[in-house]
Image: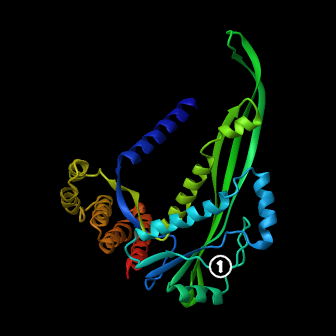
Amino acid sequence: MKNLNRIAILLLIGLLFGACGATNRLTMGAAEPARITIPSDVMKIGIINRSVPSEGNKTLDQIDKILSLEGLKMDKEGAEAAVAGVQDELTRFVRYESVDIIEDSKVQRKGLGVFPAALSWQDVDRICEENDVDLLISLEFYDTDTKADVAAEMVEVPNNFGIKAKVPHTRITLNTVIKNGWRVYYPPTKDILDEVASNNYVTSTGQGINPVKAMEAVVGRKEAVLQNSTYIGNLYGLDTRPKSRRVTRDYFVSGTDNFVVARRRAQAGDWQGAAQLWEQEVNNPKGKIAGRACYNMAIINEINGDLDAAIDWASRSYSDYGTNEALRYINILRNRVNDERRVDQQLSR
């Protein structure tokens, strides 16, 4: 019985290695649509900051600042850095004629770390008309919340006489969470194109002979928060731009001598030379070989950017020869076609 189990295990291992040995993997670039689709007629963008505390919330805001050991201007300057980060990123995208930060004292502000009610479309229309912009990006809320972790202990340090003496020592760790939320308002259709919130974290530490000295040692915290806030804005701006990502594909490398030679050509970067050999096998009398060849022809057409031809070859591989891998590949290719169309729309003017 033990021998039978051993044989079964060896056969399974052999099948696994055989399956892995039948294919090689490649990577290629693929377009990824922007998470936020900005309509093609938008040429001028306005950015507003609704996160400044309103009169009714100033008391709560000040208490929060004291409790979380924040600087008096931390939230205000952090929000401004985030808004500037969005502007910087959008300005790099040559599609837009202008990207302006709008100061509007009439904008309803809440100043709390949660989404306020959306702006009325009357306000959105007014802001856009007064500032000659087509679309409004709003930092709806921005709030930093800092918690202090204090550890006190006695440590030995040498004095002027070389004798170690025990002195109090305090270590403070400040964990700051940056809470922020954004909306994108599009007046022509009265649509909120995006609404997203996120938390980002900054940690800083300091130590000294007492809590006051330890706090003084926590330098650079404000700068770190501002840098992170700028980065948050940059990332939100990038959400409006298509990206490129790396994707992986498996192609067949065994079946006939042509597959073996084609494998070496592909490894040497001669993909067109490999495709010439695969094409010679698409009518092989053995269905398994022909199906693999058709599948690989789909791969080379995707590499060359002809997704329609790639779908045709993958469909032939599955429908005519039953290559199981081809069915999944067809769906991948169709998704790529949809992504390419969305990217074209997002880049069109």
Q: Is residue 297 left or right of residue 154?
A: left
Residue furthest to the front in view is: 160
Residue 273: in sight, yes or no? Answer: yes
Picture mark count = 1
Image quadrant in which the C terminus is located: bottom left
In the rendered image, which quarter is residue 122 located in? bottom right
Residue 76 in the image, given as x and y percentages of width and height: 65, 63
Q: Which residue is mark 1?
A: 105
Q: Amino acid type of disc 1? A: Ser
In the rendered image, which quarter is residue 207 located in? top right
Residue occupying image coordinates x 77% and y 62%: 61
Q: Is residue 132 left or right of residue 50?
A: left
Instruction: Give 68 or 244, whichever is nearer the viewer.
Output: 68
Q: Is residue 145 left or right of residue 27?
A: right
Residue occupying image coordinates x 78% and y 69%: 57
Residue occupying image coordinates x 67% and y 60%: 75
In the rendered image, which quarter is residue 228 located in? bottom right
Residue occupying image coordinates x 70% and y 31%: 208
Q: Reply above or below: 343 against 67.
A: below
Residue 145 in the image, given as x and y percentages of width and height: 72, 55
Residue 330: in sight, yes or no? Answer: no
| Mark 1, secondary structure of its residue | loop
Image quadrant in which the N terminus is located: top right
Q: Reply above or below: 316 against 274.
A: below
- Here the colouring is rainbow
Instruction: Give 202 or 271, whichever is nearer the viewer.
Output: 202
